[in-house]
C-alpha cells in the first residue's frame, strides 16, 4: 500500500469504529522536545534506571533521585502539547467509547485537553507520601529538597511507577478492559518493551481489534499490527482525522 493509501485506510477504520483505544509512549512527546528513553539520545542511554527509577534507588539516595526528577521537571515545564496531542483530543470527542492510555508522565495529554485519559505510569507533577501515601499535585520547579508531605510531614516521592513496581490495580483493570473491547487500537510512539503496555497490541489483536501503529521505525509489536504508519507523530496523527 502507498503511504497515502495507508493513511486513508487508517482514517476510514477510525471513522467507522464504535470504540477506540489509544496507547501512547515517549515518541508522541518527542515532537514537543522531550527526550525519549531508548532512542539515540534517550534518557536510558545516559542514565542508569537502577540508580534513578527504582524504589531501591530512592531508599538509598532520595536526594539524588529527586535531583534527577527536578531536572526533568525543569525541562518538561518549558514544553507544550503538539499537534498529535491535540488530534487525540479531537478523536476523543468523536467516540463515546474512547480511552487514551499513556505511559508518559509529562502531563501533556491533560494539558492538551484529553479527559478520557489513564496515565498508567503516573505523573511527574504529582508527589506521594512514603508514610501516609497521600497523593498531591506539586508544580514547584524545582521542588525544594527534601520535599515533605503537607499532611504528615513524611518524605514524599514522585508519583511514578518505577521499575520493579506494579501498576495501580484500577489502572490495570481499566486499561486491560479498554484494550480487550475496542474495535480499533492506535499505538503511537512506544518501543513496546515495558509491560504491561508491551502486551496491549497482542491482547487487542486476539480480541479482534484492528491495530494501527504510528512510529518512526518498526518496533517489536510492528509485526503483529494491521497497519504501520511510519513517520513523526505530530505530522501523522492529525492526518487520521
Ligand atoms: P521509548 O523511549 O522506549 O520508545 C520511544 C518510541 O518512540 C520508539 O519506538 C521511537 O522509535 C518512537 N519515536 C521517537 N520519536 C518519535 C516521533 N517523533 N514520532 C513517533 N514515534 C517516535 O519510550 P516508551 O516506549 O514510552 O517508564 O517507554 C516505556 C517506558 O519506559 C516509559 O513510560 C518509561 C520508561 O522507563 C516510566 O517513566 C515509568
Image (cartoon, rainbow, N blue to C red):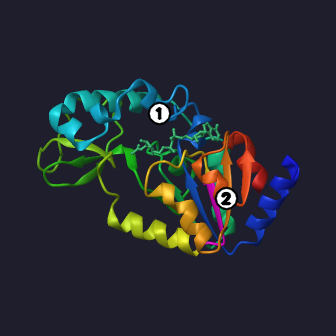
- Residue placed under numbered mark 2 in the picture: 225
Q: Position of residue 153 (x, y in %)?
A: 12, 44
Q: Does the beta carbon at disc 2 come under 8 Å from ligand 1? A: no
* Numbered circle sitting on residue 76: 1
Q: Quadrant of residue 139?
A: top left
Instruction: Name the residue nearer the viewer: 36 or 152.
Output: 36
Answer whether residue 115 is visible to the viewer in this image: no
Residue 136 as seen in the image, left or right of residue 191: left
Instruction: Name the residue nearer the viewer: 102 or 94.
Output: 102
1 and 2 marks in contact (CB < 8 Å): no
Secondary structure of the residue carrying tag 2 is loop
Prevailing SS of the magenta stretch: strand
Q: Position of residue 122 (x, y in %)?
A: 38, 50
User: For the image shown, how many numbered marks are present on the structure?
Assistant: 2
Q: Quadrant of residue 8?
A: bottom right
Q: Residue at x 36, y 68 (%)?
A: 170
Q: Residue 176, relative to residue 123: is it above or below?
A: below
Secondary structure of the residue carrying tag 1 is helix
Tell me which segment is drawn in magenta.
182-187
Q: Residue at x 48, y 35 (%)?
A: 37
Of circles 1 and 2, the one toward us is 2
Q: Does the beta carbon at disc 1 come under 8 Å from ligand 1? A: no
Q: CA distance from mark 1 to mark 2?
A: 31 Å
Residue 81 as seen in the image, left or right of residue 42: right
Mark 1, Cα crowd under 10 Å, few <14 / some 14-19 / many 20+, is many
Mark 2, Cα crowd under 10 Å, few <14 / some 14-19 / many 20+, is some
Judge whether residue 184 is colored magenta.
yes
Amino acid at each position: 500500500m502507498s503511504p497515502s493509501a495507508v493513511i486513508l485506510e487508517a482514517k476510514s477504520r477510525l471513522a467507522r469504529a464504535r470504540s477506540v483505544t489509544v496507547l501512547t509512549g515517549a515518541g508522541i512527546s518527542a515532537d514537543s522536545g522531550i527526550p525519549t528513553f531508548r532512542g539515540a539520545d534517550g534518557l536510558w542511554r545516559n542514565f542508569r534506571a537502577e540508580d534513578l527509577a527504582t524504589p531501591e534507588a530512592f531508599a538509598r539516595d532520595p536526594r539524588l533521585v529527586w535531583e534527577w526528577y527536578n531536572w526533568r521537571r525543569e525541562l518538561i515545564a518549558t514544553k507544550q502539547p503538539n499537534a498529535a496531542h491535540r488530534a487525540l483530543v479531537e478523536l476523543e470527542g468523536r467516540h463515546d467509547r474512547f480511552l487514551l492510555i499513556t505511559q508518559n508522565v509529562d502531563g501533556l495529554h491533560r494539558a492538551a485537553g484529553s479527559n478520557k485519559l489513564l496515565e498508567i505510569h503516573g505523573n511527574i507533577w504529582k508527589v506521594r507520601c512514603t508514610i501516609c501515601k497521600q497523593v498531591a499535585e506539586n508544580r514547584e520547579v524545582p521542588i525544594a529538597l527534601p520535599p515533605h508531605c503537607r499532611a504528615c510531614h513524611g518524605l514524599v516521592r514522585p508519583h511514578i511507577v518505577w521499575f520493579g513496581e506494579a501498576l495501580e490495580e484500577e489502572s490495570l483493570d481499566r486499561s486491560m478492559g479498554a484494550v480487550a473491547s475496542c474495535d480499533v487500537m492506535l499505538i503511537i510512539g512506544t518501543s513496546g518493551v515495558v509491560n504491561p503496555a508491551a502486551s496491549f497490541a497482542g491482547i487487542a489483536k486476539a480480541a479482534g481489534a484492528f491495530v494501527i501503529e504510528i512510529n518512526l521505525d518498526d518496533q517489536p509489536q510492528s509485526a503483529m499490527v494491521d497497519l504501520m504508519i511510519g513517520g513523526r507523530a505530530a505530522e501523522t496523527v492529525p492526518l487520521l482525522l
